[in-house]
Amino acid sequence: MEKIFVTRPALPEYEEYIEEIKSIWETKHITNFGPKYQKFKKVIKEKYNYQHIDLQCNGHMMLQNLLSCIEPGKIITTPFTFVSTTLAILNSGHKPVFCDINRKDYNIDADKIEELITPDTVAIVPVHVYGSPCDVKKIQDIADRHHLKVIYDAAHAFGVRVQGEDIGTYGDASMFSFHGTKVFNSIEGGMAVLQSEEMLKEVVARSNFGISDALTVYNGVNSKMNEFSASMGIVNLRHIDDNIKKRRKISEIYDDELKDISSLILLQRRDDVEYNYGYYPVFVSDSKFSADGLMKYMEQAGIYSRRYFYPATNDMPLFQDYNTTPIAKEVSQNILCLPMYADLTENQALDICSRIKEYFQNGK
């Protein structure tokens, strides 16, 4: 059987991308806020009705630049995320404080945030894990009462809507990743949706060596998006709705085929959310089995899943002196993400489910 990997980038037809980049040879403008960067911003703003956005080289640098706009202090965040989230907090001059997660959607437990707030707390950085929205209303209520900023790591959540509202409209700002593994990609890239024009200007300046009005006024970096990445984003945006439909079909096959396996807990989806189906996590709940065992059993058949996220961030060497979070630790040890991408065929999805059923029927 052909190898099936956990993810595969969505790419347009070769000719479509070549047609988009042709003009770069005419303008000779390949970076520094060029025509493609401007066009990419324009088409995103038009499609999603955003007012203030910026595009940068990747999601990590975008998040770091957003957090650099906030005075140094402690930031409450989740340990159940890719380490990029926590490193962006550290690299922007802050100290992470880990809040445990809930078992329902693996997001930060909003009921546990308030007890972690101190006079040194300046912000909350929740993550929409697997593209499932956090409890945005409760988090905003806490932030408003304690005068804290809310910056969402929405790396997984591009195109997601909650009760009809785009996920990017919540908090002071949201960062979206356009990495090749995501539902939507610009090869590499990151976007910020911001509520404040003032913060937008600072984020843009920080991406260009901290330069504002020809003078360096911030401790900036070089994280601008180049024209080739912007071009890929322009072209891929034309196909995102179709790609999400294809992912949804694979997700529905998984739902139907795996729902009766008592040793697995599937992600609970909300009726008031429009998902992008970026990931399909399963939680191995039976101690006779394991996420690692399931992963290796599928690998024998050429099916590659991923223990995502394992280990929890505060179980990594750099963060082991930080506070513990028992639920995040347990989830990280038992979670596995199945293959999910737009080009995955229905027959491949059925083969994956058959292999999973074999594992739980036949044992290790």
Image (cartoon, rainbow, N blue to C red):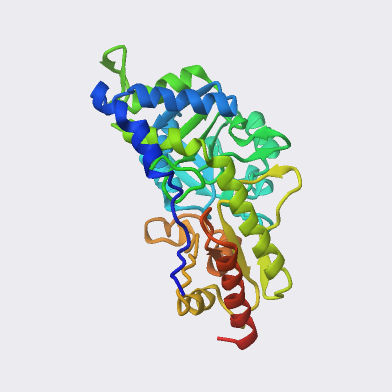
Examine the rendered structure and indicate whether residue 163 appears above or below residue 31: below
For image coordinates 61% across by 76% down, the residue present is 354
Whether residue 226 is visible, yes or no, is no
Total labels: the figure holds 0
Q: Position of residue 350 (x, y in %)?
A: 61, 69
Q: Out of 317 and 341, give the one closest to the viewer.
A: 341
Q: Residue at x 58, y 44 (%)?
A: 242
In this view, 200 is above or below 248 = above
Q: In the image shown, does 282 or 6 lie closer to the viewer?
A: 6
Residue under the image location 55 percent in, 64 percent down: 338
| Residue 10 at least partly seen | yes
At x 62%, y 45%, the residue is 113
Q: Is residue 358 left or right of residue 192?
A: right
Image x and y of residue 101, in percent: 61, 54
Dividing the image into 4 quarters, which one contains the C terminus?
Answer: bottom right
Q: Position of residue 363 (x, y in %)?
A: 59, 87
Q: Is residue 267 left or right of residue 36?
A: right
